[in-house]
Image (cartoon, rainbow, N blue to C red):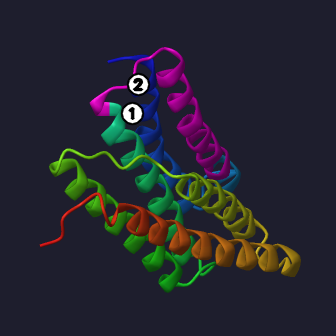
Amino acid sequence: MNLANKITMLRILIIPIFLVFIAVNNIPYNIEIAIALFIIAAITDKLDGYIARSRNEITNFGKIMDPLADKLLVTAALISLVEFGVISTWVVMIIIAREYLVTGLRTVAAGEGNVIAASNWGKLKTVIQIIAIIFGLIYVKYDNNTILETITNVSMFIAVAITVISGADYFIKSKDTIVLD
């Protein structure tokens, strides 16, 4: 297993540790540690991709596991934010639905021998979601801060909008790539 794939696996291993710290209140600095773990895991997303490309070590394992690790991380954090009442369930459902739909589209395309590469909208979506989640996690710590609440709500709204736009973009660009029976 190359270094990039090891970093991807590290991101997946960080997720349950993040969940323990976000959920267990009697651990000192639990929220701060959870935020740090989320940020570290988010950084590893860029790091593993950079390493794989710079070393020309892009693998089929990495092509599958890297986006899966991202989805697991974002989903875990979003569900945690619902648990704390920071965001509504519909926000998470829109984001998760888009991920399933685009993954399904990519699977169908791959079955036909086509690869649907990550788009700029998709990359922007990931960055905006991570920023919105970080604001949400900080708001968990400082839940009476109305400015932080507003920033969290606005950033989540932007994340949902970019998520929908990026999903639509994948389907529009792929309409001639796959055959729908």
> Which amino acid type is shown beneath numbered disc 1?
Met
Task: Report the predominant secondary structure element of the magenta stretch.
Answer: helix
- Above or below 126: residue 81: below
Q: Position of residue 21 (x, y in %)?
A: 55, 53
In the rendered view, does 134 fall on the left or right side of 85? right
Q: Could you say which is closer to the camera, residue 29 or residue 73?
A: 73
| Residue 33 within the magenta-colored segment of the rendering | no
Q: Position of residue 115 (x, y in %)?
A: 31, 45
Q: Which residue bears the numbered disc 2?
A: 6
Determine contact: label 1, label 2, CB under 8 Å: yes
Q: Position of residue 91 (x, y in %)?
A: 53, 80
In the rendered view, does 107 fall on the left or right side of 45? left
Q: Which residue bears the numbered disc 1?
A: 9
Quarter of the image for residue 103 reads bottom left
The CA distance from mark 1 to mark 2 is 5 Å
Residue at the image point whose x is 67% and y is 63% from the top: 137
Callout 1 environment at 10 Å: few (<14), some (14 to 19), or many (20+)? some
Q: Position of residue 48 (x, y in %)?
A: 51, 29
> The C terminus lies in which quarter of the figure?
bottom left
Q: Could you say which is closer to the camera, residue 61 or residue 90?
A: 61
Residue at the image point whose x is 52% and y is 67% from the top: 78
Q: Could you say which is closer to the camera, residue 51 or residue 143?
A: 51
Q: Could you say which is closer to the camera, residue 181 or residue 150?
A: 181
| Residue 58 within the magenta-colored segment of the rendering | yes
Question: Does dot 2 land on a helix, a strand or a loop?
Answer: helix
> Which amino acid type is shown beneath numbered disc 2?
Lys
Single out the residue that lies furthest toward the front.
176
Question: Does dot 1 land on a helix, a strand or a loop?
Answer: helix
Q: Which residues are magenta?
A: 34-61
